[in-house]
Image (cartoon, coloured by chain):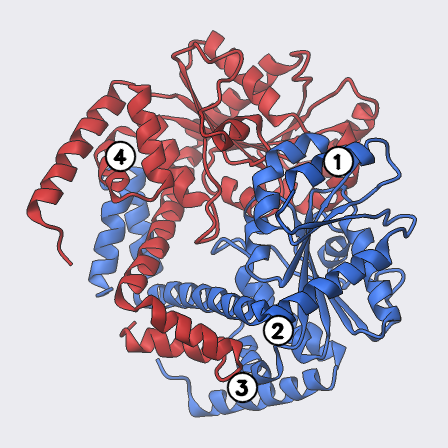
Chain colours: A red, B blue
Amino acid sequence: MAKPVRQTKRRDQLADELARAIFNQDTRAAGRVLSLIDDRDPLAKAVLKRLYARTGRAHIVGFTGSAGSGKSTLIGRVTAELRSRQKQVGILTIDPTSPFTRGALLGDRIRMRDHFLDQGVFIRSLATRGSQGGLSGCIHEAAQLLDAMGKEYILIETIGIGQDQVDIARIAHTVVVLVTPESGDEIQGMKAGILEVADLLVINKTDLPGAEELYAMLAHLLDNRGVRIFKTSALSNQGIAALVDGIEKHRSGLLASGDQQQKASEISRNQLLALIRDELMLKLRGKTSKSNIDQWAQKIAERKSDPYTAAEVILGELGF
Amino acid sequence: MAKPVRQTKRRDQLADELARAIFNQDTRAAGRVLSLIDDRDPLAKAVLKRLYARTGRAHIVGFTGSAGSGKSTLIGRVTAELRSRQKQVGILTIDPTSPFTRGALLGDRIRMRDHFLDQGVFIRSLATRGSQGGLSGCIHEAAQLLDAMGKEYILIETIGIGQDQVDIARIAHTVVVLVTPESGDEIQGMKAGILEVADLLVINKTDLPGAEELYAMLAHLLDNRGVRIFKTSALSNQGIAALVDGIEKHRSGLLASGDQQQKASEISRNQLLALIRDELMLKLRGKTSKSNIDQWAQKIAERKSDPYTAAEVILGELGF
């Protein structure tokens, strides 16, 4: 169904205005567009289309690690260090246990103690999307918005296990995985995951007992894999400059080797496939009625049909 | 492209044999079909179609809670209690930090100490799926397989935060959320999630200090929401019978109120939509070449196009 001309025109105008405001680093406009992204409002897409050509300069760093590993504190310290190096920073969190998110739960953008008056930092938490599975769509778009605002580093905080960890590796140029001497139990289980996604490994809370043993164990585990291990104590601000050096070195290594281009291409492919998937589901919902799906669900629940046959019939009816 | 007749015939025959073996509770066949499900092999679907009419009797219980909350130990205790009540039990884990999963990482089905010689229990860990986002497809299918084998209770272990938590609520009849006196920090952040998905709340490790305060805090938080709170110590086997009573009571409550039917219908709808989504993506990949997607990804990465336009063009070309 085509939109009325007037409505489309109005949306285009609004999208132009919002895009202009984003280029001018208007944080209020950025907050509004992020809400539109969270709500999957078509206006968000119109704005992002306008922004896209001016993106691609930001370096996206994903931070993962289980609850209690100190991600938020570390991200705060890394941000302070990047700011002292005159870099513009954007922070996105998708960890529901993050203090940033708690702000979002209260319906209010959280203000990070050290940075809330700093115009060079933009902080936002994103809702966990329930309907389609996976967080990638939203994060790609939010990161591109910050990129278009001129943020040079975008730090994304996510939980360290499960699907969300896989997703972050599809978006970030550099993946930082945090472990602590407290998380020894988990590390055995995380092994495979860590080795697959980590570019840099951080042992946080190095002042706790067991840090040296953990280091030795991880060094042995990661031998010859090109993953560097850093020791930090985010709380007492130790080891942060070395970590930021490591992030910058990883970035310049990617640029020098041409891997950055390959990574950019992979990230684009992942976003494209996520968009196509979402769009296909939207089209499906437009073409079939909710009651048709409900009737099939009922039949399946009553074992009068099975879900595999139902999916085939529905797709066949729609000519897919 | 139609499959050659002979190949289809052979697959049908193999599917018939596997389905028969599953009905006969052949655990080796079950392990094989679960591998086929994990691999998204078309043979899995053919088997599941045959099994489906004999499913729908199992009660699916999801256990979520962060790493270290004692999920695996609790599931072991609940299993022992259910076995002592003569119930058949299936266990699925999708938590990469689970000891069950460690077994899977070693390429070997883990043997849970107390249950490995017990034919009434079937344990399996599922790989985290990376490609499509979300775990639901695989879990639905694995649960249906166990259901067809005659398992009366299917216990699913998942991580307690992020997307995976949302997913489990789409599959389980009863969602059990574990917290411990150690996880006080997280609970503030988890609040909204807990209230949305928990049917039963378990305070595990009640022997630790702070358990009573936690109980009081949660009781206040959950006031009037119909979520019952249980106190357990999985390690010392305390409170397990009461929890299993609670699970059985939740089950019979759902059956008596007719909510079970509604829940079954919702679960069917979720599985149907997940299957349709996967099938659409498969069809898309069949209709467009990998190189077409790669070329678009390249153009997007170079900012010669944007992902939104690319998605529209690709879907348009395919007549979607």
Q: Is residue B215 above or below residue A152?
A: below
Q: Earlier in the sequence, mark 3 or mark 2?
A: 3
In what element is the residue under mark 4? helix
Q: In the rendered image, which quarter contains the C terminus of chain B?
A: bottom left
Which of the pair A148/B9 is nearer the observer? Answer: A148
Q: Residue at x 36, y 43 (%)?
A: A268
Q: Which residue is mark 3?
A: B11
Question: Can you give x and y, in whole percent of width and height, for residue A225 in the image?
Answer: 64, 37
Structural distance between the alpha carbons of marks 2 and 1: 38 Å
Q: Earlier in the sequence, mark 2 or mark 1?
A: 2
Q: Is residue B91 above or below residue B200?
A: below
Q: Is residue A59 left or right of residue B302?
A: right
Q: Residue at x 47, y 43 (%)?
A: A170
Which of the chains bears the disc numbered 4? A
Q: Which residue is mark 2?
A: B144
How many tags in the picture? 4
Q: Nearer the viewer, mark 4 or mark 2?
A: 2
Structural distance between the alpha carbons of marks 4 and 2: 44 Å
In what element is the residue under mark 3? helix
